[in-house]
Image (tube, grey):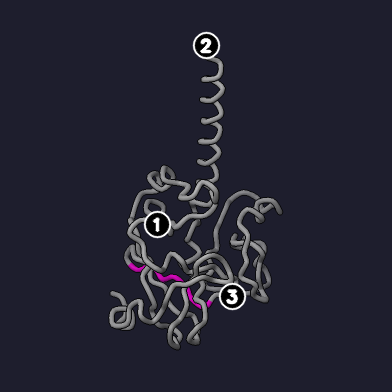
Amino acid sequence: MPSKSLVSAGGRRIQTRRSDVHGNGVFAVQDIAEGETLIEYKGEVISWKEALRRHPHDPSQPNHTFYFHIDDERVIDGGVKGNAARWINHSCDPSCEADEQDGRVFIKALRNIAAGEELSYDYGLIIDEPYTKKLKSEFPCWCGSKNCRGTLLAPKPDEKKGKGKKKEAKSASKGRKDALEARKEAKKKKDKAKGAKASKSGKR
């Protein structure tokens, strides 16, 4: 059940506008208290198979999606029937987190947020392959925070040793699976297209 603050105030407490971080962003219109629920991440709930079929939303940005991982079977496509939540940018020092409740995702304030401040949460993308410099550069971060990792990719477990445990927000699921799978799918489509082109050019 969403909190009263979400039901009573809705989008009037936040607004979408151009961001200095990246493209569009979502900003607080009034002061927001820690723990408040701000907005639900809405969109069409689809299977991962369908998500891979639709990928990429923008061919010029194959690593950018509006997908939000729910579990190993379902994903929310914020690009279809979505709302302002899809424009919330990533930050390595986030002001919000995503809380999954019965297949629904709600964005909540991690701390007090002042009116005019841009909302953010840690996307924490996870890819199984080794984090090379090239791979990290494919998922750049522009948050500009003091603790910026320089990438949207979440630190590997061995990189967290000695830093203490931190609650893994559900927001880390945004792209948890699609980051790797989408790259593989994009490569398959590209290779298939090359093969088809070569086959066609060989016909008389």
Q: Toward which corner of the image does residue 152 lie, by quadrant?
A: bottom right
Report the side of 188 relative to 32 (left or right): right
Report the side of 11 relative to 17 (left or right): left
* Residue 112 visible (yes or no): no
- Packing grade of label 1 (10 A; few <14, some 14-19, many >=20) is some
Q: Which residue is mark 2?
A: 204
Residue segment shown in magenta: 95-101
Q: Toward which corner of the image does residue 191 lie, by quadrant?
A: top right
Determine if the magenta segment contains residue 98.
Answer: yes
- Packing grade of label 2 (10 A; few <14, some 14-19, many >=20) is few
- Packing grade of label 3 (10 A; few <14, some 14-19, many >=20) is some
Report the side of 96 relative to 2 (left or right): right
Q: Which mark is residue 2?
A: none
Residue 116 on image: x %, y %: 50, 83
- Amino acid, disc 3: Asp
Residue farthest to the right, as pictured: 133
Q: Main secondary structure of the magenta part?
A: strand
**Lower sequence index among marks 2 and 1:** 1
Q: Secondary structure at mark 2?
A: loop
- Amino acid, disc 2: Arg
- Amino acid, disc 1: Gly
Q: Which residue is mark 1?
A: 79
The count of marks equals: 3
Q: Which mark is residue 93?
A: 3
| Residue at point 40%, 57% (across, down) | 79
Residue 10's place in the image compared with 43, above or below, is below
Residue 31's place in the image compared with 85, above or below, is below
Q: Quick check: marks 1 and 3 in contact, CB under 8 Å? A: no
Q: Secondary structure at mark 3?
A: loop
Instruction: Quote the CA–CA distance across marks 1 and 3.
Output: 25 Å
| Residue at point 44%, 58% (across, down) | 66
